Amino acid sequence: MKRQGHGVFALVKVNLKLVGLGVLCLVLGAGAVIAAAATAEGKDIPVVMYHALLKDEARHGKYVISPAEFESDLRYLQEHGYTTILVEDLIAYTQGAPLPEKPVLLTFDDGYYNNYLYGFPLAKAYSSKFVLSPIGRCTDLYTDTPDENAYYSHATWPQLREMAESGLVEVQNHSYDMHQGKGGRLGLKQRPGEPEGAYRQLITEDLLQAQQAIEEGVGLRPTALAYPFGAVSKSTPEIVKGLGFQCTFSCQEHISRVTRDPASLYDLGRILRKSRLSSQQYFEKTI
């Protein structure tokens, strides 16, 4: 009887192990299905990259377009059923919230005063949104010594706060003082031969300085980083993620697919908006 009981007990143990394995397989299988579904479900997000807006035709070109061209873009997008969104909408999407049927993200780099002078009134007129990523040092400079010149000035902290509080403009990070190409460094890119520890400390201090300046000046802490010049090194993305950024913008010209996976928000492509193209010509190529 003891042997028989022992045999039954052993058989039960074996069966329990099999059941446990079966449950584990089901859990892992379900997890894989959920992960696959999160990756499969997604939206193609066109991201437009602007810089400056000026009326002077002599300045129009690769990085400067006219206010009239920007207005034409906003009108084109509205007439063709597109909805302008912000980074906060992308983050919410990865957490389960919906996106509009035809989303588009408009971004302005550097934080020029002319974005406030011309772009912001047009955004209000068309109920359109855009992301603005200022260079922190330049914002500090023009806040301390105001000089409202459309050609070269940068927006001040009060102007950035006004735009942000409208709900139409989202202020993000573009570095504090690394939007330059000198001394063998381009933007956030690591110099050849630069020690990894020194490099990590440098960009960490710069980006956190910009985070603090924007939070104090605008009232919100940025969630995204627009890489200056799109320049990165091998370890840059990992450092940036470690600082809490949930989204990054590159200068690679392609449309990115955003899914429910938060990792899909890194290294989003952007397509530069140049002057002397009609809105139809530009957007037919872009979206």
Image: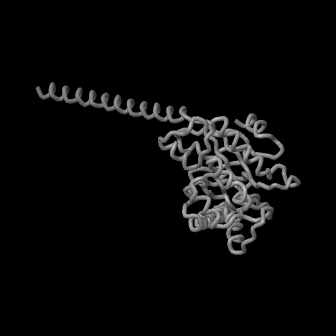
Q: Nearer the viewer, residue 62 or 224?
A: 62
Which of the image's four quarters has the N terminus?
Answer: top left
Residue at 44 percent of width and 35 percent of height = 31
* x and y percentages locating residue 144 in the rendered image: 69, 74
Q: Residue furthest front?
A: 125
Query: Height in image: 137 above or below 28?
Result: below
Work out whether 251 lies above or below 9: below
Q: Which residue extends farthest right?
A: 58
**Image point 67% across, 50% down: which residue?**
107
Residue drawn at x 75%, y 70% as measured from the top left: 147
The answer to which image quadrant residue 11 occupies is: top left
Q: Nearer the viewer, residue 167 or 41?
A: 167
**Residue 66: x, y in percent?**
79, 51
Farthest residue to the bottom: give it.
Answer: 144
Q: Is residue 162 visible?
A: yes
Instruction: Determine if residue 189 is in view.
Output: no
Colouring convention used in this rendered image of the protein? one colour
- Marks counted in the figure total 0
> Foreground: 153 or 93?
153
Q: Looking at this view, is 285 or 237 the one in front?
A: 285
In the rendered image, the quadrant that contains the C terminus is: top right
Residue 37 pos. (x, y %): 50, 32
Query: In the rendering, at what x and y percent does residue 198 appear?
Result: 66, 65
